[in-house]
């Protein structure tokens, strides 16, 4: 079972606990931790963590606003922000680091995305395209399920959590917790994205196992 788990920059305080919980459940390289009762079936999961930009990309945004960077320059600086977040997660958790999606191993891996995206350059260079859409592109390339882990329970409408929504209803809605380019990408590629609150690591574990979980499923295939 292949999964792409995008961990938002808004979770930087909680992200290491979440990654460590994922490693405990699914292993990472030689870290096949037996505490809690691993089974061979559990190790059939390949969980690729795509880091957000967080505070590292925010610095690029501020620099862009102040000094009017070119679109290409801002794009690659923001991708380097994702790379910095990847270094932070790897440093604090010891999870395996990868910089390719050609053969993602079993267990939990953290993607260092700069080299891959520099070589492929698959998406427009715009602030509408953030790590959300990048994670969706990676999931598409690998035929993986996409889980977006953030600091809210999902998408809200009129103060209520929406458990399932068509991506077409998210197009042009900048108040959502997903980036502006993601809904169109999901629609074009007939993909789904499950949004889960990463402040509860057990929710993310349940989502990986496809168990019912509080969150929002954004559907590009309806």
Image (tube, grey):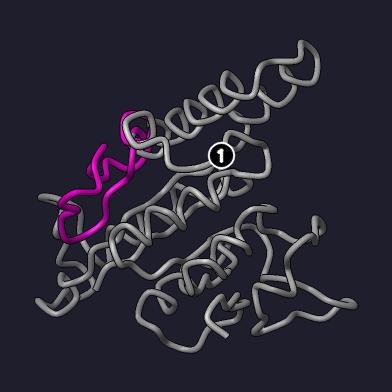
Residue shown at the point (73%, 68%) measured from the top left: 170
**The quadrant where residue 205 appears:** bottom left
Tell me the quarter of the image containing the N terminus: bottom left
| Viewer-proximal residue among 157 and 142 | 142
**Could you tell me which secondary element the residue under label 1 belongs to?**
loop
Rendered position, 58 above or below 122 = above
Residue shown at the point (21%, 60%) measured from the top left: 107
Q: Residue furthest top?
A: 67
Residue shown at the point (42%, 87%) measured from the top left: 211
Q: Is residue 107 magenta?
A: yes
Judged left or right of residue 60, residue 1 is: left
Rendered position, 183 above or below 210 = above
Question: Can you give x and y, in whole percent of width and height, for residue 84 in the image?
Answer: 45, 28
Decide: few, some or many residues near mark 1? Use Cα within 10 Å; few <14, some 14-19, many ≥20. Answer: few
Q: Which range of residues does the magenta coloring cover?
A: 91-116
Judged left or right of residue 7, residue 113 is: left
**The quadrant where residue 35 appears:** bottom left
Question: Can you give x and y, in whole percent of width and height, for residue 197 in the image?
Answer: 59, 66
Question: Can you give x and y, in whole percent of width and height, for residue 62 in the image?
Answer: 75, 22
- Residue placed under numbered mark 1 in the picture: 124
Q: Residue furthest bottom?
A: 212
Q: Is residue 3 magenta?
A: no
Residue shown at the point (37%, 53%) measured from the top left: 138
Question: Can you give x and y, in whole percent of width and height, for residue 95 in the image?
Answer: 27, 45
């Amino acid at each position: 079972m292949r999964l792409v788990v995008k961990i938002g920059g808004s979770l930087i305080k909680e992200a290491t606990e979440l990654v460590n919980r994922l490693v405990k459940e699914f292993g990472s390289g030689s870290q096949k931790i037996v505490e809690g009762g691993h089974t061979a079936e559990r190790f059939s999961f390949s969980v690729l963590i795509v880091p957000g930009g967080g505070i590292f990309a925010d610095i690029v945004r501020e620099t862009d606003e102040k000094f009017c960077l070119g679109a290409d320059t801002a794009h690659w600086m923001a991708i380097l922000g994702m790379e910095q977040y990847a270094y932070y997660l790897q440093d604090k958790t010891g999870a395996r680091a990868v910089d390719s999606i050609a053969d993602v191993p079993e267990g939990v891996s953290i993607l260092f995305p700069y080299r891959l995206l520099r070589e492929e350059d698959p998406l427009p260079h715009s602030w509408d395209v953030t790590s959300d859409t990048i994670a969706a592109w990676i999931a598409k390339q690998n035929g993986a399920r996409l889980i977006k882990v953030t600091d809210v329970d999902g998408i809200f409408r009129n103060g209520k959590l929406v458990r399932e929504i068509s991506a077409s209803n998210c197009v042009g809605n900048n108040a959502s917790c997903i980036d502006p380019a993601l809904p169109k990408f999901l629609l074009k590629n007939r993909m789904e994205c499950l949004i889960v609150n990463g402040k509860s690591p057990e929710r993310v574990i349940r989502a990986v196992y496809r168990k019912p979980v509080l969150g929002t499923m954004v559907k590009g295939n309806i």
